[in-house]
Image (cartoon, rainbow, N blue to C red):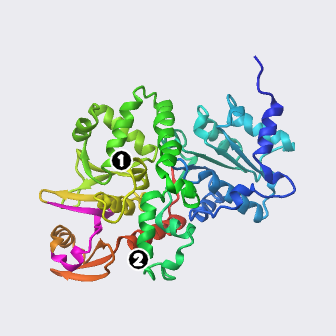
Amino acid sequence: MKKITRDEIARRIRYENPWWDEQRAIDGYFRKMVPRAYLDAFHKLVTQKDVNRAVVLMGPRRVGKTVLIHHFIQRLIDGGVDPRRICYVSIEAPVYTGCSLEEITGYYREIFSFDNLKDCYIFFDEIQYLKDWEKHLKRLVDDHRDATFVASGSAAAALKRKSMESGAGRFTDIYLPPLTFHEFIRLRGKETLMDLDGNKAKDLAGLNDEFINYINFGGYPEAIFSEAIQSDPGRYIRSDVIDKVLLRDLPSIYGIADIQELNKLFMTIAYNTGNEVSLDALSQSAGVAKNTIKKYLEYLEAAFLVKIIHRVDQSGKRFLKANFFKVYLTNPSIRCALFGPVSTDHEAMGNMVETAIVSQLFSFDNIYYARWKGGEVDVVFLKDSQVSSCHEIKWSNRFFDQPGELQNLIKFAKRHGLENTYATTIDKSGKRVVDNVFISFMPASIMSYRLSKAAAELHTMFDLKLHL
C-alpha cells in the first residue's frame, strides 16, 4: 500500500497558507467577508504574552470559526508579523490522517528550515479529528514557549471535555456563538435602523422586520448573503449543521449506536424550545430511557445545539435536584429550519422571541429562570448567588397597557428588593410603576439588539476563561 509522502503533506501545508507568497494576504474568499464582532476579543486573547497557553476556539458548525481565524491572520500580517511565521492547518484534510501535531509542526519547520518556533503563530483547525489532540497540544505548549498555538473545532463536546481534563493550566477556551442579532443587523448593513448609541430604534417597524428575518434564518453568516439559502434555510441548516452533528460528530465521539433515538430527542427539544421540561417528560415524549436522555442532553449541549437553563425558586435558590429545567436551541433559526418559518402572528412566536433573546446571553453562566407553585419569571440573573435582575419575555403589547397583570414579576422583584424589572413588547416602550416596582418595557427586537451588543463588548473586555 502506498503511503502519503512528506512532499504531499508539505504541498498541502503550502496550499493552506497563501500569505507565504508575494501577496502576503489571506484568500480572497475570506477577505470579502465582514469580520464578526468577536474578532477583537479573539485578537486580545491570542496575542496575550504574559501567559503560556494555547487558545481553543469552540462553537457550533457554520458560525464562522475558520473565517475568524483567517481575519485574525490578516490582522497579524497587517500588524507587521512575518507571514512565514504564521501557519494554518485544517486537520480534517485527509492528507494529515495519522499525523500527530508534533509531526505537522515539524513539516512546517522543514519548509522554512526554522531552527525553532520563536514568534510563530500556529493554527490547528477542526482539531477534534486528531486522536489525543489535547495531549499533543499540551506538549507543544510546554516545549515551545515562544510560540502561540490556537486550536479550533466544531465537535465541541469532545473539545470542551478534553480541554478541561487534559489542558488544565495550558488551554484557554473562547466560545464563538451563532450570529447574534446585533451582528446580524451589522452584517445586513441595517445599522441605520438604530440610533448611534444602539439604545433606540429610528425605524422600529424596519427593526421588527429584521428581527423576524433573524429568527427565521439569522444564526449563520452564510445565510445572510445567500438568497438561495434564505429561500430554503431548512435545507442548509439541516444538512450543514444539524445532520453533521447528529449523524457524524456525536456518534463518532461517543459511539452512539441508535442515531434515530438521538434525532427523535433533538426534534422534540427543538419543537419545544424555551419550555420547561423534565427527564420524565422528555423520556415519555421521545420514547427514550431517562439515563439515555441525560447523556444525550449533555452531548447536545456540549455540541452547542442546545443550552440548558436551570431553575431557581421564589427565594432565588437553586434546587438540589434539577428535576425541571428549560432547554433552548442556541439559535431560533434551527427550529424554523426544521418546522417552517414563523411570522408575527405564528403560534410559536412567543417561544421564538424568548429563544432569540436568551440566546444572546449564552456566553454567560449566571442565567436562570424562576418557578414556584403558582408563579414563574422567564429570565433571572444572579450575581454572587443573589438575584440582580429579572425579565419577562413577551411578544405582546397587552402587559404594557395592563402592567398589573405581571404579578409574578412584581412579587419576585419586591421579594428581592429590585426597584427595576424588565418586560418586552412588540412595539411599545416606557416605564410603568406597580406597587413601587418600576417595570421598563421595550420592544423585544430592541432588547435583543442591546443585549447582544453588550455581550460582545463585555466578551471583548472580560470574558477570558482560563483553566487555572
Q: Which residue is painted at 53% across and 79% down in the image?
A: 192
Residue type at mark 1: give it.
Answer: Ala
Identified at 79% across, 64% down, the residue is: 80
Q: Which mark is residue 369?
A: none
Number of numbered discs overlaid on the protein picture: 2
The CA distance from mark 2 to mark 1 is 28 Å
At label 2, which amino acid type do we have? Answer: Ala
> Which numbered marker is on residue 205?
2
Image location of residue 457, percent across then percent down: 51, 69
Q: Residues within 10 Å of mark 2 (few under 14, many from 20)?
A: some
Which of the marked residues, 2 or 1, is nearer the chain's N terminus?
2
Residue at 65 percent across and 61 percent down: it is 33
> Would you name the residue on which mark 1 appears?
270
Taking depth in this image into account, of 112 and 444 the one nearest to the observer is 444
As drawn, 383 above or below 7: below
- Range shown magenta: 375-404
Q: Is residue 18 visible?
A: yes
Mark 1 lies on a secondary structure that is helix
213 horizontally vs 409: left or right:
right
The answer to whether residue 270 is magenta is no
Q: From the viewer's perspective, is the residue at label 2 or at label 1 nearer?
A: 2
